[in-house]
Image: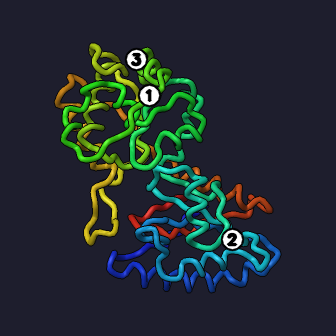
Amino acid sequence: MSLRILRKASQTQNAKQLSSSFSKFTRSFSQLSSQSKPPSFGIAFDIDGVVLRSEAPIGGSPQVFRRLYDDSGNLSIPYVFLTNGGGFTESKRALELSELLGVKISPLQVLQGHTPFKQLVNRFENELIVAVGKGEPAAVMSEYGFKNVLSIDDYASCFENIDPLAPYKKWTTKQVKEVAARDLVFSQRVQAAFIVSDSVDWSRDIQVLCDILRTGGLPGREIGHQPHLYFAHDDLAYQAAFPTERFGMGAFRIALESIFNRTKARMLMMMISCDELCIMLKLLVQINVQNPSSCSGVYNFWETKSICIQ
């Protein structure tokens, strides 16, 4: 299977180039959608900066997506969304995209940076894990099947004075009142920490993660074996509403790794998710249920560097 890249050349020309690429591309397969023979290709769309910007559709993207369906509203061309963004469940993101683009999108069609974490459920299903990031990271992991997961907000709130800068922060996080949750935190070691989406509070999250990682999963205790650490992606920066790029999860990883390595005798061990493309290809084949073997290529509307799969 080949992956054909259709990407934008520069940020300043993104909207016009994307609209032009969409128009040319949709014209090329509009005739295919009226034929009975299933298409021999699928499409992968990036979300941020390609389909949406600041949660608003770019150019004529809603009209383009409607052309991927037949007159009865059935999907004619299999496609998925592939993004390193995240923090919310695939079902919630699919609902938001459906409303913004005016078409029915299944959670199966949404592949986020943290989606590959599903593959680790069998390993950590009943273990205590901590989920880090904006949005609803714990809800994301719970939907994947992890049964003992706490957000870093909830986890940190169980430890008095773990964040010495907390009194100076203008925002507050809810306190964990459930006795069961506190008992879980103090009786079980954290077996893994998952960076699901961009950290909102770098100073606290780096401090708490270092506590977890160097004590074997029980902050405040003696040094122990490092728990597992997983990152959804490693993007150094991303384009948001501000004119220049903003630091992303990759920058947070560099900061955490640098501080940990300066305070520990051994190097930080981590895993960065890189299974999105493999999962994408499998999903496109699953979506093309009429004739899975007919899918021989993927067109990718992507914002970043070129990727090629042979």
Does residue 104 lie above or below 140 as drawn? below
Residue visible at 33% across and 69% down in the picture: 241
Would you call the spot at circle 2 few (<14 residues within 10 Å), some (14-19), or many (20 or more)? many
Instruction: Determine whether, in the image, residue 175 is placed left or right of residue 44.
Output: left
Disc 3 to disc 1, how far (Cα)? 14 Å
Residue visible at 58% across and 50% down in the picture: 279
Q: Tell how many labels.
A: 3
Would you call the spot at circle 1 few (<14 residues within 10 Å), some (14-19), or many (20 or more)? few
Mark 3 or 1: the one toward you: 1
Residue visible at 67% across and 75% down in the picture: 68
Query: What label sits on residue 177 in the rendered view?
Result: 1
Q: Position of residue 174 (x, y in %)?
A: 39, 38
Query: What label sits on residue 186 in the rendered view?
Result: 3
Its colouring scheme is: rainbow
Q: Earlier in the sequence, mark 1 or mark 2?
A: 2
Query: What label sits on residue 284 in the rendered view?
Result: none
Q: Earlier in the sequence, mark 3 or mark 2?
A: 2
Residue visible at 37% across and 21% down in the picture: 217
Q: Amino acid at mark 1?
A: Lys
Does residue 8 lie above or below 225 as drawn? below
Residue on which disc 2 sits: 77
Instruction: Determine whether, in the image, residue 202 is placed left or right of residue 8.
Output: left
Identify the element where label 1 is drawn.
Answer: loop
As drawn, which residue projects farthest toward the right? Answer: 36
Mark 3 or 2: the one toward you: 3
Viewer-side residue, 165 vs 55: 165
Identify the element where label 2 is drawn.
Answer: loop
Q: Amino acid at mark 3?
A: Phe
Q: Quadrant of residue 164?
A: top left
Q: Amino acid at mark 2?
A: Ile
Mark 1 or 2: the one toward you: 1
The quadrant of the image that shows the N terminus is: bottom right
